[in-house]
Image (cartoon, rainbow, N blue to C red):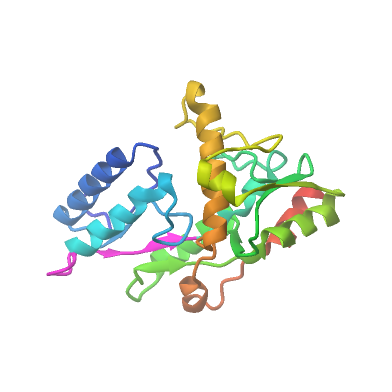
Amino acid sequence: MNDIDTVLSFLAMFDQKEALDLHKKLINSAIATGVRRFAPSEWAAASNSGIAHYQYKDDVRKYLEETNSNQHKIEYCLFQPGIFTDYVGYPRAQPKHFDTFSMFVDFQNRRAIIPEDSDAPVTFTSLRDMCRLVAHALEYNGVWLTVGGMQGTAFTVYELISLGEKLRGPFKAEKISNEDLETRNVTTSWYPVIEHQAVPDEMREQMSKGILLEYMASIKRGVWTVSDEWNKLLTDFEFTSAETYLKDVWL
C-alpha cells in the first residue's frame, strides 16, 4: 500500500467473523504502510442498527475506535447513505458494476411489504450520488468526520408507495405483523429474492426471508434514517431526489 493516501473497503459477506477479520487485516496493513484515510465497508444504515447481517460493521467501527484510542493512527469515515434508490428502479435500471434486486417496495410489480405500525422515515440516496460524494470527500481538505451520513431523500415507506402509485398505478401492500417479526415468520404472499453473488443458491430462500424480516424490524427502529454530515460539509453538492430519479426510470 505504499504511496496510497486512502483505502475504501467494499467487503460484503454474510460471515460476520470473516468480515471483521479481513477488515482488521486491512486496517493494520493500511496503518503499517502510512495510509492516511480509511473508509470501512458501511454504505448503508446508521451505526448500531441491530441488523444481523450488518453486525460486522459495528464491530469494525469499535475496532477503529480502539485503534485510535491512545494515539491517532488513521483517519476514517463511516459513509452512510441509507438505501440506494437504484434498488427501487430494479429491474428497469441496473448499475453496471453493482448488483441490485427487488426490494420490499416493488415498482415493477406494483406491490409492497410494510411493517405494522411504523411510519419512520427511510433515507434513499442514489448510487451515483454516493459515488460522486465520495469523490468529493477524497478531495476534502479538512479532517473526515467519523460518522459521514448523507441524505438524498427521506421518505416514509407510505410516501414511497404513494410515489409508486403516482408513477405506476395502484399498489397492493401487505403487512408484516409485530408477532411475525418476533417469531421470524414470513406470511406474505411474496418476498423479495436476494440476487447476490455472496448468497449460495441453496440458501437463497432462507436468507431472502431473513433479510426481509431484518429490513422490516430495522425500519421500525428508524435506523435507515441516516444523518447528514456530508450534506452540511459539502453545501454545494446537489443530490438527485428519489422522485426525480424514479420518474426518469419509470416514466
Q: Residue at x 60, y 43 (%)?
A: 95
Is 140 located above or below residue 246 in the figure?
below
In depth, the one of 107 and 76 nearer the eye is 107
247 in magenta: no
Q: Is residue 129 left or right of residue 38?
A: right
Estimate the x, y position of residue 186 in percent, counting from the top left. 60, 38
Q: Residue at x 78, y 39 (%)?
A: 109
Q: Is residue 247 visible?
A: no
Provide residue 83's location: percent of width, then percent of height.
56, 54
Quadrant position of residue 104: top right
Q: Is residue 133 above or below residue 53?
A: below
For the stretch drawn in magenta, the main secondary structure is loop
Marker count (numbered): 0
Q: Which residues are magenta?
A: 68-80
Q: Nearer the viewer, residue 39 or 19?
A: 19
Relative to 66, is 157 on the left or the right? right
